[in-house]
């Protein structure tokens, strides 16, 4: 398996966060739209032997802040601890150079001016009556959160996505282009999630490190792994939906899934592959539907 870094440009607001499992779903729908149902079924059926593992999208040249051991904060000033815990990303160079990651390093980025600015605004909508037309007065208005991201004057908003796969580079580029060709996530039909592919390159993650960090949400497939992992993690519950045209023909909702979030860390020697997790099946009554439950990982040394 080779790890590739895909660089994309965000040209609009977002309604759906750029998370690995959702991007993976867009890849599948892109194949289905352009090559048909048989092609996407064939692609899915090869995944257990030839995984296609997609990370979250991170601000260009940044990676998630890893979860370190709790007592590593004892050397920090109390006034800084809350600020440090709000930091989401740190420069990727610390991982590539295999430098020790510490909370002291985190404190350098409390007021990182080079980081993108995120603003969440609520967009008010009407509840539509799709049977009789018009709106439903009893339900009234509801709010949808929109994410607006800026990178400073005259700067592009670029993101990095890491993909682990054995596919040819040209195939990966095609799949990513297809996945974003109709926009990304909710409200893509009215301008949200406008994304363009910029470039792709193979990258070499560090081969040494006692800890490993997940670059997207994942599940732990084997219960016996927990003791070996020494897992430090935040959890999220995802209530996935099927995408594209099928939302009008079948129940759009998948079963709720408990994930460990990006930035979660664990004992690097507990796994012998560049990703953690598994492909999830049986998450919808239509057994063709799957969900990505794996994520790429990067090794590091904890200071």
Image (cartoon, rainbow, N blue to C red):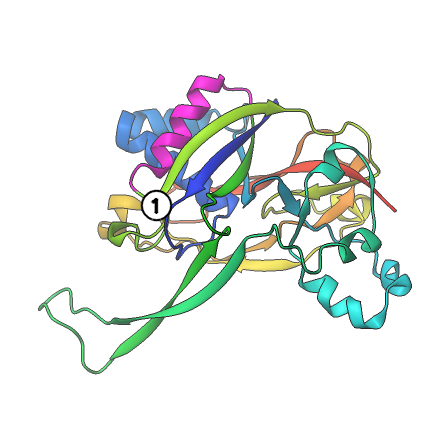
Magenta part, dominant SS: helix
Disc 1 element: loop
Q: Name the residue located 67 percent from the left edge and 50 percent from the top edge.
A: 263
User: Can residue 36 be seen?
Assistant: no
Where does residue 44 sit, x and y in percent of width and height?
43, 30
Image position of 132 with respect to 261: above or below: below
Q: Position of residue 254 (x, y in %)?
A: 41, 53
Tell me the quadrant of the picture where the N terminus can be found: top right
Q: In this view, does 119 lie to the left or right of 104?
A: left
Measured as percent of width and height from the top left, residue 237 is found at 54, 60
Residue 229, percent from left and from top: 78, 45
Give the vertical position of 206 relative to 107 (above or below). above
Q: In this view, does 171 lie to the left or right of 194?
A: right
Find the residue positioned furthest to the front.
153
Q: In which quarter of the image is residue 124?
A: bottom left
Callout count: 1
Other-residue count near label 1 (Cα within 10 Å), few / some / many at <14 / 14–19 / ≥20: many
Q: What stretch is highlighted in magenta?
A: 165-182
Q: Is residue 157 shown in magenta?
A: no
Q: Name the residue under label 1.
A: 194
Of residues 269 and 112, the one nearer the viewer is 112
Foreground residue among 256 and 302: 302
In this view, which residue lies farthest toward the left? 132
Q: In this view, does 209 lie to the left or right of 138?
A: right
Q: Which of 296 and 241 is in front in this view?
A: 296
User: Residue at image x 27%, y 33%?
Assistant: 33
Residue at 79 percent across and 39 percent down: it is 300
Q: In which quarter of the image is residue 35?
A: top left
């Amino acid at each position: 398996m080779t790890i590739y870094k895909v660089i994309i440009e965000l040209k609009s607001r977002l309604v759906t966060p750029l998370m690995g499992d959702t991007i993976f779903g867009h890849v599948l729908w892109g194949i289905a739209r352009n090559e048909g149902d048989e092609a996407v079924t064939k692609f899915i059926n090869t995944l257990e032997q030839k995984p296609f593992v997609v990370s979250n999208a991170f601000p260009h040249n940044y990676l998630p802040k890893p979860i370190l051991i709790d007592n590593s904060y004892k050397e920090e000033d109390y006034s800084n601890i809350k600020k440090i815990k709000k930091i989401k990303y740190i420069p990727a160079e610390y991982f590539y150079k295999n430098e020790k990651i510490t909370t002291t390093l985190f404190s350098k980025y409390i007021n990182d001016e080079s980081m993108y600015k995120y603003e969440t605004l609520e967009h008010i909508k009407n509840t539509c009556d799709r049977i009789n037309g018009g709106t439903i007065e009893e339900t009234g208005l509801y709010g949808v959160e929109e994410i607006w991201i800026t990178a400073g004057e005259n700067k592009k908003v670029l993101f990095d996505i890491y993909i682990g796969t054995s596919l040819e580079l040209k195939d990966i580029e095609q799949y990513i282009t297809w996945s974003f060709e109709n926009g990304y996530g909710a409200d893509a039909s009215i301008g949200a999630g406008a994304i363009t592919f910029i470039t792709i390159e193979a990258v070499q993650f560090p081969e040494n490190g006692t800890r490993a960090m997940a670059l997207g949400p994942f599940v732990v497939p084997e219960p016996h792994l927990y003791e070996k992992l020494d897992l430090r993690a935040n959890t999220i519950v995802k209530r996935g939906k099927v995408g594209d045209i099928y939302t009008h023909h079948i129940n759009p909702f998948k079963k709720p899934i408990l994930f460990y979030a990006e930035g979660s860390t664990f004992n690097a020697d507990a796994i012998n592959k560049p990703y953690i997790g598994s492909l999830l099946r049986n998450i919808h009554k239509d057994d063709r539907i799957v969900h990505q439950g794996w994520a790429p990982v990067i090794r590091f040394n904890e200071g």
